[in-house]
Amino acid sequence: AQSVTQLDSHVSVSEGTPVLLRCNYSSSYSPSLFWYVQHPNKGLQLLLKYTSAATLVKGINGFEAEFKKSETSFHLTKPSAHMSDAAEYFCVVSDAGGFKTIFGAGTRLFVKA
Amino acid sequence: GAGVSQTPSNKVTEKGKYVELRCDPISGHTALYWYRQSLGQGPEFLIYFQGTGAADDSGLPNDRFFAVRPEGSVSTLKIQRTERGDSAVYLCASSFGTGSYNEQFFGPGTRLTVL
């Protein structure tokens, strides 16, 4: 069975400082992992996905995530936060077939001017 | 092209009533997913269609919930005898193919309120 834990419900950073959103997963199989972002009153948008081709995955808007099997982690990072990054972020794991997807509870990112 | 659309955007109903929520996937997408997102939580998987058939309905909470996709395109989520606990945002997503790496494109959701 798959599960995903987002370690922080809220993260607050200042504009221009690094962002770290933490995610740990549990999977019986080699997992497929994703990060989605949800802006207020907008639909979920894929940021990046881990496809086993490379452990460091680059996504849109300067975000990236590193798959660490030994730590069962898939943390999301960005070198410099922008005000427009303020949103809810979800770490997602899917089953071996890639159909049933499990979302984490979400991390709300606040960016201070 | 157009993204995933869901209607209605908001639905208010009374406890015990029947509701239908509609999802129009992106044209050509064979896979369709329904999720439920309660306040302050991540989306919860309900059901997945590949074509016309429900490939996995293990997330449906009970037999009051049912979903169809008769022609392999539009899908309807049906909730009978609604309860206040059914209040949530119901999200639909579609993807081009199957497999772990296919990106799901999400609609804006239907906010269901059961009074």
Image (cartoon, grey):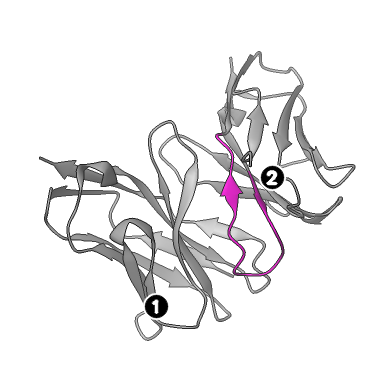
Q: The residue tagged with tag 1: helix, strand or loop?
A: loop
Chain of the residue where label 1 is placed in the rendered structure:
A
Q: Nearer the viewer, residue B97 or B20?
A: B97
Q: Nearer the viewer, residue B99 or A8?
A: B99
Residue A104 inside the magenta-drawn segment: no
Looking at this rendering, what residue extends furthest in the front direction?
Answer: B1
Q: Residue at x 57, y 27 (%)?
A: B87
Q: Nearer the viewer, residue A93 or B41?
A: A93
Residue B102 inside the magenta-drawn segment: yes
Q: Which residues are magenta?
A: B93-108
Residue A75 in sight here? no
Amino acid bearing label 1:
Thr
Residue picked out by circle 2? B26
Residue picked out by circle 1? A72
Q: Is residue B49 above or below residue A68?
A: above
Quadrant into which the C terminus of chain A falls: top left
Q: Is residue A15 above or below residue A23?
A: above
Q: Residue at x 37, y 86 (%)?
A: A70
Please indicate whether residue B1 sits to the left or right of residue A81 in the image. Answer: right
The percent position of residue B14, horizontal first and vertical second, equals 66, 13
Task: Residue A79: name its quadrant.
Answer: bottom left
Task: Residue B30: name its quadrant.
Answer: bottom right
Chain of the residue where label 2 is placed in the rendered structure:
B
